[in-house]
């Protein structure tokens, strides 16, 4: 593994994840926006999960408009799972400028090259410098 990976791992911008939003909070949020009651929302979410299993087992991706596609996959060991491909609308909404309220770690490194990340690593770690390999 190239040494540059240390710098990339250390300085790549990433979202600082907060506490996971659990079912009761999600249900309360949906309830407040739709007027559906808690029981109906919980039943719908449970059935959505069951639908992903049902259609996934038969090789059918499931598309939710404005959300994305949930597609069955298999790994090299024969284990099945679900891949999610985000819809363009959802991606666009998430990327509306000025609306993100969370924290971005290494925000100052957005758009920086691997060489710039290595340069920062070398500045921050003078006793563990990384040499950039010539291309």
Image: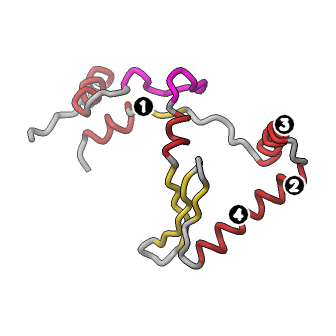
What separation in Å lies between label 3 and label 1 (alpha carbons)? Answer: 34 Å
Between 28 and 88, which is closer to the camera in this rendering? 88
Residue of label 1: 13
Residue 49's tag is: 4
User: Comparing marks 3 and 1, which lies closer to the viewer?
Assistant: 3
Query: What residue lies at 49% left-to-right and 54% top-to-bottom?
Result: 85
Answer with mark 3 or mark 1, whichever residue precedes in sequence.
1
CB contact under 8 Å: marks 1 and 4: no
Query: What residue lies at 50% left-to-right and 36% top-to-bottom?
Result: 92
The extreme front residue here reads 65
User: Comparing marks 4 and 3, which lies closer to the viewer?
Assistant: 3
What separation in Å lies between label 1 and label 2 (alpha carbons)? Answer: 39 Å
Q: Where 58 sits versus 67, above or below?
A: below
Residue 4: % across, % down: 25, 39
Q: Secondary structure at mark 3?
A: helix
Q: Secondary structure at mark 1?
A: loop
Q: Where 124 sits versus 48, above or below?
A: above
Within 10 angstroms of label 3, few (less than 14), some, or many (20 or more) residues?
few
Residue 32's tag is: 3
What separation in Å lies between label 4 and label 2 (alpha carbons)? Answer: 14 Å
47 sits left or right of 60 in the view = right
């Amino acid at each position: 593994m190239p040494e540059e990976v240390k710098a990339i791992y250390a300085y790549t911008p990433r979202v600082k994840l907060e506490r996971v939003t659990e079912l009761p909070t999600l249900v309360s949020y949906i309830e407040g926006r739709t007027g559906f009651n808690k029981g109906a929302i919980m039943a719908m979410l449970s059935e959505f999960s069951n639908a992903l299993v049902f259609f996934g087992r038969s090789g059918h991706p499931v598309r939710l408009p404005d959300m994305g596609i949930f597609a069955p996959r298999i790994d090299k060991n024969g284990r099945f799972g679900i891949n999610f491909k985000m819809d363009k609308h959802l991606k666009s909404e998430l990327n509306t400028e000025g609306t993100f309220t969370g924290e971005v770690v290494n925000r100052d490194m957005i758009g920086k090259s691997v060489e710039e990340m290595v340069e920062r690593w070398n500045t921050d770690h003078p006793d563990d410098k990384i040499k950039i390999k010539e291309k």
